[in-house]
Amino acid sequence: MTDATVTQPAAPGGAPKKTSLLKLDQRTRRRNAAEKRFKIYGMIAVGIGLVFLVALLSAIIVNGTNAFTQTFVTMNVTLNEDVLDKNGNRNPADIKKVSTFGYAPLINSALENKVESLGIETLLEDGGDMRAIMSASAAAQLRDYVLGNPDQIGETIEFRFLASSRVDGYLKGRVTRESIARDRNISSAHLLLIDDLKELGVVERVFNWGFITGTDASEARPEQAGIGASMIGSFFMMLVVLCLSLPIGVAASIYLEEFAPQNRFTDIIEVNISNLAAVPSIVFGILGLAAFIQFAHLPQSAPLVGGLVLTLMTLPTIIISTRASLKSVPQSIRDAALGVGASKMQSVFHHVLPLAMPGILTGTIIGLAQALGETAPLLLIGMVGFIASEYPNGIQEGFLDPNSAMPAQIFEWAKRADPAYYERAWGGIIILLLFLMTMNLIAILLRRRFERRW
Amino acid sequence: MNDMRRLERDVDTSDIKISAKGVQVYYGDNHAIKDVDVSIADKTVTAFIGPSGCGKSTFLRCINRMNDTIDVARVEGDIRIDGEDIYDKAVDPVQLRAKVGMVFQKPNPFPKSIYDNVAYGPKIHGLAQNKAGLDEIVEKSLRRAALWDEAKDRLNEPGTGLSGGQQQRLCIARAVATEPEILLMDEPCSALDPIATAQVEELIDELRQSYSVVIVTHSMQQAARVSQKTAFFHLGNLVEYGQTGDIFTNPQDPRTESYITGRIG
Ligand SMILES: Nc1ncnc2c1ncn2[C@@H]1O[C@H](COP(=O)(O)OP(=O)(O)OP(=O)(O)O)[C@@H](O)[C@H]1O
Ligand SMILES: [Mg+2]
């Protein structure tokens, strides 16, 4: 309204021009229109963002949820003493001598029995032929059981084995009769058998914890592969990143922001930190390769090295966000503390830091989340390409033994030829995203908690 | 400039608490305080008056070295408290500020509870032996700042949730809680109603028994009521300094006269 009166100066010497508040003047109308237009632009922008988000999430869910279920075959296996323990004295050394190869016949005959007892007609001649529906891991599973329970030799026990990835794909609709036309691993006779077995509940598709907790498997056994081992790798890496980058980053920021004199030297440092934040992560990877592996001779593919590299990458993020939140604490708070005779350090630690805490924590968690999803630097220190087929057995091994990390594992799976691995890559993405969402949630909660105090 | 007169005054004040000679303050290129000489007596209330932007706050902040925290500020000259040069290299400003308390122009309570605001100074200086002692200090300080009645039931509520005037009194309570020898008050009553103002003035008068108080005020009446000595600043110069009564009834400098009669400012 003031604008309006300014543009319509009162007649010289006379009273200001009378206007009605009930009628919008030209200028107000134009301003309102501009405001409305801007709101519409904003809503369009938000809408586009939402469309992308929904598209992304639905693609991930559609492609990835299948990885969380797996097809299993349930049957009774007779642990034949003649095969497993010829001498009959349950000597562990003797039992160990039988390789997984020796267990194959047990599975063959168990399959044959099962099919026979259910009265299923099949074109397949014997158990050896039928075994293509089973995962190659079945023999190993059986052997592990026998080694763990030698007293069960001679008994008949019910087992649930993984079905082969082709069978799994058939149940999930990924494998069809057309697609196996030239597949030597499985034939349509197998698929007919599967149809029957599925009807009778012998073959079923259930939730697969093995995918979440398991280790990676060889190229030929996608049904066995899990993300668990690389999750542990990521965990140890994040531990390194958190323990190094938080204290170093916060200490550096406090020093730079509160104590360092303002001169050319600190200006240069400041510019360089901002530059570091923009350096592509692969550069940190090659730096880590040169410094930690080639120079310091730390083991390749170790989560410790991965953590160190990611620390370098996360530090600038943490420093920048910490400095920004320190800067946002008003000077008057520092003055108040100094005014009652607090030292600089007391004023920082008693007053400034608690106020900056929400910002620092958010920055740290966002930095960590970034590091958790980072793949490129891991390429160069050998964490991508490593088959994490074993769990580390201890804290020290966790840091130093070669392992993979979640994003590296996903990349690895996506690279492999078998479409079953492609599905697992999407499943891995879901798990990774769940972790990131949890971390963001924690950031929000911490922020709330610290802010609610005042 | 008015050396002769000041000398006379200095003679009849028994104890000089703060003495400043040739003080210059620069904010970068801005010469904010120009060659100020002043001697502030112990156990007196000294008022600084003058138009906005003339450097009252700046000079006040020299006395407890708060200007150290401003990067562009540069202080020259000689300021002594009890004869000791406070800008000496051996002086730790932290120790100085425990001795010279300050109430800032803008109320700046900590975003903590009312209790913690007042207790913070005594806590870091170890003035209380135990919780009971601390409680006592807090209550006494809040009473002196005329805030006790309003605050006693909400000691655990944040100090930032108080009204502007209450915050101002909270800052006064916080400053007196550390028992400083000198109290610098930068417009402590700017947001207070007449009743609270009267209470704070009473406090200032009471503090005078043991401390030296320097108060910046824009109210001539207040300067006349509470202070024994008054200094008039204008454009960074100390124009006139003397007994409050003399300044108000018989100003020597035309600038002082026009300021107190309301013609400049
Ligand atoms: N932090 C600062 N940085 C730069 N210049 C400053 C700063 N503080 C004050 N000044 C300048 O110093 C001069 C004196 O300011 P000062 O705050 O001492 O005035 P004042 O007498 O307290 O005024 P008021 O009565 O309005 O509080 C002003 O010209 C101001 O612009
Ligand atoms: Mg001021």
Image (tube, coloured by chain):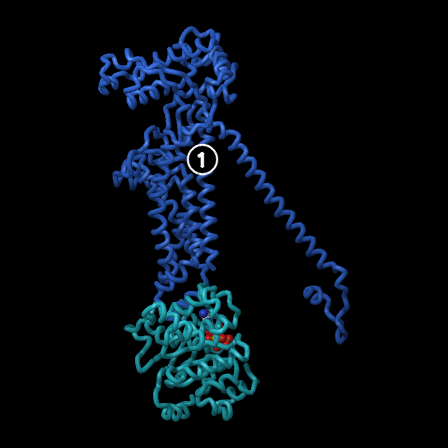
Ligand 1 under 8 Å from disc 1 Cβ? no
* Drawn side of residue A414 relative to residue A311, left or right: right
Crowd around label 1: few <14 · some 14–19 · many ≥20 (10 Å) = some
Q: Which residue is at a point 42% across and 47% down the rendered structure image?
A: A365
Give coordinates of residue A341: x percent, y percent: 36, 70
- Residue kind at label 1, given as amino acid type: Ile
The residue closer to the viewer here, A170 or A319, is A170
Residue A108, above or below A300: above
**Quadrant of residue A92 in the image?**
top left
Position of residue A209 measured from the top left corner of the image (x, y, whole percent): 42, 29
Which residue occupies 57% across, 85% down? Answer: B263
Residue B178 image-quadrant placement: bottom left
The answer to whether residue B173 is above or below residue A303 is below
User: Judging from the image, what secondary structure is the residue with disc 1 in?
Assistant: helix
- Note the chain letter of the cyan one: B
Q: How many marks do you count on the picture? A: 1
Question: According to the image, label 1 marks what residue?
Answer: A431
User: The C terminus of chain B appears in which quarter of the rendering?
Assistant: bottom right
Quadrant (top left, top right, bottom left, bottom right) of the N terminus of chain B = bottom left
Residue at 30 percent of width and 35 percent of height: A300
